[in-house]
Image: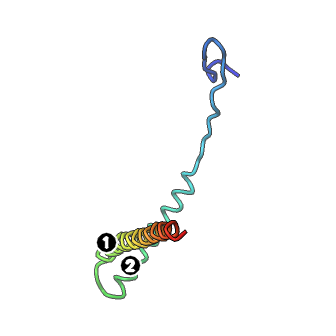
């Protein structure tokens, strides 16, 4: 191993950690392309059916997706809050009863 791949520590040569290179650009580009194509298909299909502008459909789909994710996130947070609160109350009652 050459000296450029090793570091010096207290006069001893220690090997540097291995360089791991992950190449996902092609797969990520393909996924992004499919996502964009799906959004365009939804926008064009909605525009053809209703005879409106595809940009409105695209904007509506993006806003709708954001709103749906926000609603689902809040709903999940509320459910988890209630479950943990019930778990705490059950634990306190369990301790008091025993």
Q: Would you name the residue on which mark 1 appears? A: 59
Q: Which residue is drawn at 40% across and 73% down?
A: 75
Q: Where is residue 73 in the image (x, y as percent from the top left)?
A: 40, 69
> Can residue 39 be seen in this snapshot?
no
Q: Residue at x 57, y 51 (%)?
A: 24
Tell me the crowding category of disc 1: few under 14, some 14 to 19, or many 20 or more residues within 10 angstroms, Cα based: few
Which disc, if any, is residue 18? none
Which is nearer the eye, 24 or 18?
18
Tell me the crowding category of disc 2: few under 14, some 14 to 19, or many 20 or more residues within 10 angstroms, Cα based: some
Q: Are marks 1 and 2 in contact (CB under 8 Å)?
A: no
In this picture, residue 12 sits left or right of residue 94 = right
Q: Is mark 2 on a helix, strand or loop?
A: helix
Does 96 sit above or below residue 6?
Answer: below
Which is nearer the eye, 88 or 5?
88
Q: Where is residue 37 in the image (x, y as percent from the top left)?
A: 46, 70
Residue 74's image quarter?
bottom left
Mark toward the viewer: 1 or 2: 1
Work out whether mark 1 precedes mark 2 in sequence or the reverse, and give the earlier one. 2
Q: Which residue is drawn at 55% across and 68% down?
A: 98
Task: Find the distance from the CA under tag 1 to the CA under tag 2.
Answer: 12 Å
Q: Where is residue 48 in the image (x, y as percent from the top left)?
A: 36, 85
Q: Would you name the residue on which mark 2 appears? A: 44
How many labels, in total? Answer: 2
In this picture, residue 19 sits left or right of residue 95 = right
Residue 26's image quarter?
bottom right
Q: Residue furthest right?
A: 1
């Amino acid at each position: 191993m050459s000296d450029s791949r090793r570091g010096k520590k207290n006069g001893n040569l220690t090997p540097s950690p291995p360089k791991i290179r992950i190449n996902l650009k092609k797969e990520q580009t393909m996924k992004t392309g499919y996502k964009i194509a799906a959004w365009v298909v939804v926008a064009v299909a909605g525009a053809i059916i209703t005879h409106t502008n595809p940009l409105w459909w695209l904007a509506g789909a993006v806003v709708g997706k954001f709103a749906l994710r926000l609603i689902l996130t809040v709903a999940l947070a509320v459910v988890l809050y209630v479950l943990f609160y019930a778990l705490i109350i059950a634990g306190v009652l369990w301790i008091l009863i025993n």
